[in-house]
Image (cartoon, rainbow, N blue to C red):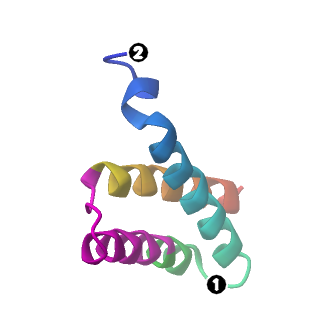
Amino acid sequence: MKGSIRGWIKTDGLLHLETSALITVAVATFAPLWAAGLSALAIGVIKELYDKEHGGVASWHDIGCDIGGILIGLFLAWI
């Protein structure tokens, strides 16, 4: 599905989105929302840096999906 949101996210991006949302909600159970969002973002960035250092590629696409998941997680934790 070229040109659609689903085509842009892809399977790997969906995993980043889901994982970031889960991390955000989990951390928000014992920390403020801003700390939960920052924690999930830090984990996502560290994962990309790890990929880069171990023969993979650091991807802005993955970071974008992480941010989308964080926003969803923040909303879910807020309601």
Amino acid on which the number 1 mark rests in the picture: Ala
Where, quadrant-wise, is the C terminus in this rendering? bottom right
Q: Which residues are magenta?
A: 40-60
Amino acid on which the number 2 mark rests in the picture: Met
Q: Which residue is mark 2?
A: 1
Give SS at disc 1: loop
Where, quadrant-wise, is the N terminus in this rendering? top left
Residue at 51 percent of width and 39 percent of height: 11
Give above or below for 62 relative to 42. Answer: above
Residue 32 included in the magenta stretch of the image: no
Residue in the foreground of this view, choosing between 12 and 74: 12
Name the disc covering residue 31, or none: 1
Residue at 27 percent of width and 56 percent of height: 59
Q: Is residue 2 left or right of residue 70?
A: left
Q: Is residue 75 left or right of residue 44?
A: right
Residue in the foreground of this view, choosing between 11 and 66: 11
Tell me which corner region of the image, top left, top right, bottom left or bottom right, holds residue 48.
bottom left
